Structures are given as structure tokens and as C-alpha cells.
């Protein structure tokens, strides 16, 4: 079953500046001709395959304290990170069966910080399905599904604010960026009401 990004599933409802500091890209091997994938090495030395166009976003995530652990989860899970066409208003998803994160191809070449925020959301799903606390969470129950999506959304909003500040990205050149700006604004202005909206939107997805 694919785990869809929160902003994709509930986008109709929930719609400090940072500069990369020269961290070298963590390539273990370059992509071969005709192959957009290469091996990316996480901070702990675990590796996974990633589309070359997403590497700048992975490198930004690497600079964040929480991001390094998420990259390690991708390596430990043997996940592949790719670009492909997604359905309308779906910006990314994690396919647990294929162990694959898919980012919508419209985001290829976008600001690496934008990619980092979206990747962080899907990486939380990867980490949660690895059973890092002794067993994998049970998504069959509404509570487990909701808790996982909240954790992923909290991480995504935290990364977005950390990279762009409380005002969000300016200018926001992509629909995903505009949705993230809106979500962050609503969260910062009324956190309790924002999470109530999240709960309402996920009642349809996760059950009661």
C-alpha cells in the first residue's frame, strides 16, 4: 500500500532563511549513461539509490540534525528515491511494498530546500515502517495511521520553517511550495485548530 503525502491527501483542506553551506554531495558512484540513478551514502555509511536530480535536496537534508537520521533510515531500508508522474495534487508517496519514494516529476530542478522538505515527510514513513522501536507501527488502526501522518507532517513543517523561516518560501513558484506556505501559516497562527483540520481530513483516509 502506498503512503501518500499529507498535503496530497488533504491538500484541498490544508493548503530563518537558509543557505547551503558547501557540504559535498555524498556520491559513492556516478550514474551510468542512460541511468538516472546513483548510489547515495547516508551519514552512517548506509547507501540507497536516488535519482540524480534529487541529490541537491538530499544534500540539504544532510545538513539538518534531524535530516541526517532520516537519510540513515533510507539507507538502512534500502529505499530507492525516484521521480515520476504522480496524480493531480499528489506531490510524493512512499510505496512500502516496492520500498520506493516517488517524487512528482514537476519538482525536478526545483529549489533543493523544497525537495528536502518533501523528502523529509516521506522519509518519516520509511523510518516508521522499519520498526526502529522494536516493531513496525500498525497502520491498520485509525490511531496508528493518524499518528504516523501527524509525525510526518510535523517533520515536514519543521524542515520548511527551518529552511525558509516562519514566512515560508518567497517567491513560491510551485503549487507544492504555495501549499506548504499556507500550511505553515495556519499552523503558526492557530496550532490546535490546524491539527483539528488534519484530524478531520484523515478521518476519511485512516478511519475513526
Image (tube, rainbow, N blue to C red):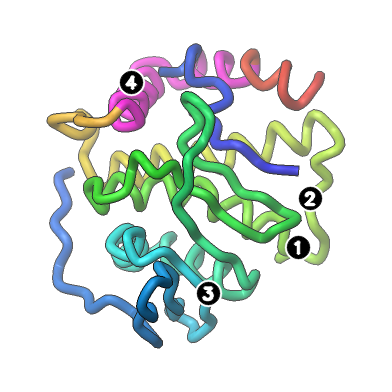
Name the residue rendered at 75%, 55% in the picture.
97
- For the record, the magenta segment spans 175-199
Residue 19 drawn at (x, y percent): 13, 56
Asked if residue 166 is positioned above or below residue 123 in the image, the reply reads above
Q: Which residue is mark 2?
A: 137
Dot 4 or dot 1: first in sequence order is 1
Give the mark nearest the N terminus, 2 or 3: 3
Q: Is residue 205 above or below residue 104?
A: above
201 sits left or right of 130 in the view: left
Quadrant housing the C terminus: top right
Would residue 65 be found to the left or right of residue 78 on screen? left
From mark 4 to mark 1, how far is it between C-alphas? 32 Å
Q: Is residue 130 left or right of residue 68?
A: right
Tell me the chief SS of the magenta region: helix
Is 39 in front, or is 58?
39
Q: Earlier in the sequence, mark 1 or mark 2?
A: 1
Q: Residue at x 48, y 13 (%)?
A: 12
Quarter of the N terminus within the rendering: top right
Q: Which mark is residue 48?
A: 3
Secondary element at image label 2: loop
Q: Quadrant of residue 63?
A: bottom left
Amino acid at each position: 500500500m502506498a503512503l501518500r503525502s499529507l498535503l496530497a491527501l488533504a491538500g484541498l483542506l490544508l493548503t530563518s532563511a537558509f543557505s547551503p553551506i558547501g557540504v559535498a554531495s555524498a556520491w559513492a558512484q556516478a550514474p551510468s549513461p542512460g541511468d538516472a540513478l546513483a548510489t547515495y551514502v547516508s551519514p552512517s555509511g548506509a547507501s540507497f539509490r536516488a535519482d540524480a536530480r534529487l541529490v541537491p535536496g538530499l544534500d540539504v537534508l544532510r545538513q539538518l540534525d534531524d535530516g541526517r537520521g532520516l537519510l540513515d533510515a533510507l539507507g538502512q531500508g534500502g529505499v530507492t528515491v525516484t521521480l515520476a508522474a504522480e496524480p493531480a495534487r499528489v506531490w510524493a508517496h512512499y510505496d512500502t511494498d516496492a520500498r520506493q519514494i516517488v517524487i512528482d516529476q514537476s519538482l525536478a530542478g526545483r529549489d533543493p530546500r523544497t525537495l528536502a522538505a518533501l523528502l523529509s515527510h516521506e522519509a518519516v514513513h520509511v523510518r516508521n515502517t522499519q520498526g526502529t522501536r522494536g516493531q513496525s507501527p500498525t497502520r491498520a488502526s485509525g490511531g496508528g495511521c493518524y499518528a504516523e501522518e501527524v509525525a510526518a507532517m510535523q517533520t515536514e513543517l519543521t524542515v520548511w520553517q527551518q529552511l525558509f523561516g516562519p514566512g515560508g518560501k518567497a517567491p513560491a513558484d510551485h503549487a507544492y511550495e504555495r501549499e506548504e506556505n499556507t500550511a505553515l501559516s495556519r499552523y503558526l497562527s492557530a496550532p490546535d485548530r490546524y491539527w483539528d483540520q488534519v484530524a478531520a481530513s484523515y478521518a476519511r483516509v485512516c478511519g475513526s
